[in-house]
Amino acid sequence: MYAVSVVSSICLLAVVLVTQLQSARAVPGKFRSMSPLRNKWLPDSEAEEDLLKVMTLADCEGRCVKHKTCTGYSYSESYSRCLLYKIKPGTPPVKNTGYHIYIKMFTEAEGYYIYDTGYIRLMKKRMSAAKATQNCTDQGGSLVAVRTKKLNDLLYKLLVKQNIWNAYIGLSDAEEEGVWKWPDGGKLGFQNWDWKGEWGRKDLNCAVITNGFEEAPWKQFECKRPNYYFCQIPMF
């Protein structure tokens, strides 16, 4: 009798542990669709799980939350079909009328600030430009490319909020002196240099954005010097 009781207790404990493990692996969060994700899906080959006869959008989202690797899903009300994905940044959605993709949204409380269809993160562990670049890449993104005043204003607000004087942006003339480029190789359009960016300093091949003034001007900076930095991470 005692042995049966012990076995029952062990079985119950195992069930509890499995339940807790499944819960820990689930990816809860706010899921959202947007214009670039409407009437789109990721093909069957990208799906972690393909569920037919899922009757509602809420049911599909619930399945994603409980799934151990799901970070997004596509749902068709017409076909009552739900596909769960582990969405990787850079995966292009494919047009498919009637399906909409929903992705897990990170929050500002987690340090993610939405800009267009991506996130901006102010990273508060100081690194050299090379290490900062690698860390942004490891997150599926790059050092931020500040191509608009709107984005420049957002970065300024984040610097002020965190009481940080300056941070790396993804601008460098390391390849060719005086030719400043963004991480994707694009040249300057919008620019916001302090002193017009012409310092004549060949040893300063990186750039930072500063919070000294509301215009948040950029300054040249020594690439090996550890500093805060901004990552720009696509949602999909």
Image (cartoon, grey):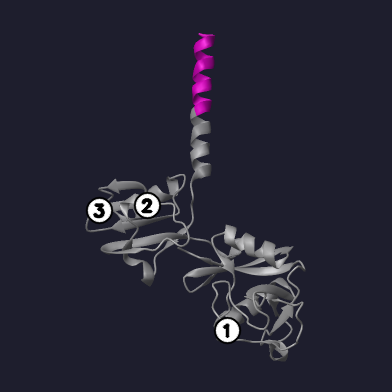
Q: Position of residue 221 (x, y in %)?
A: 74, 76
Q: Are marks 1 and 2 in contact (CB under 8 Å)?
A: no
Eye-nearest disc, 2 or 3: 2
**Lower position in the chain sequence, tag 2 or tag 3:** 2
Q: Are marks 2 and 3 in contact (CB under 8 Å)?
A: no
Front residue of 206 and 86: 206
Q: Are marks 1 and 3 in contact (CB under 8 Å)?
A: no
Residue 6 in magenta stretch: yes
Q: Position of residue 162 (x, y in %)?
A: 70, 71
Type of the residue with mark 2: Glu
Q: Identify the mark at residue 80; answer none if there is no mark.
A: 3
Q: Residue furthest top?
A: 1
The residue positioned 70% from the left and 64% from the top of the image is 124
Q: Residues within 10 Å of mark 1 (few under 14, many from 20)?
A: some
Q: Position of residue 59 (x, y in %)?
A: 34, 51
Q: Which residue is mark 1?
A: 188
* Residue at disc 3, secondary structure: loop
Front residue of 209 and 72: 209
Q: Range of the magenta residues? A: 1-14
Q: Position of residue 47 (x, y in %)?
A: 36, 50
Q: Identify the mark at residue 46; answer none if there is no mark.
A: 2
Type of the residue with mark 3: Ser
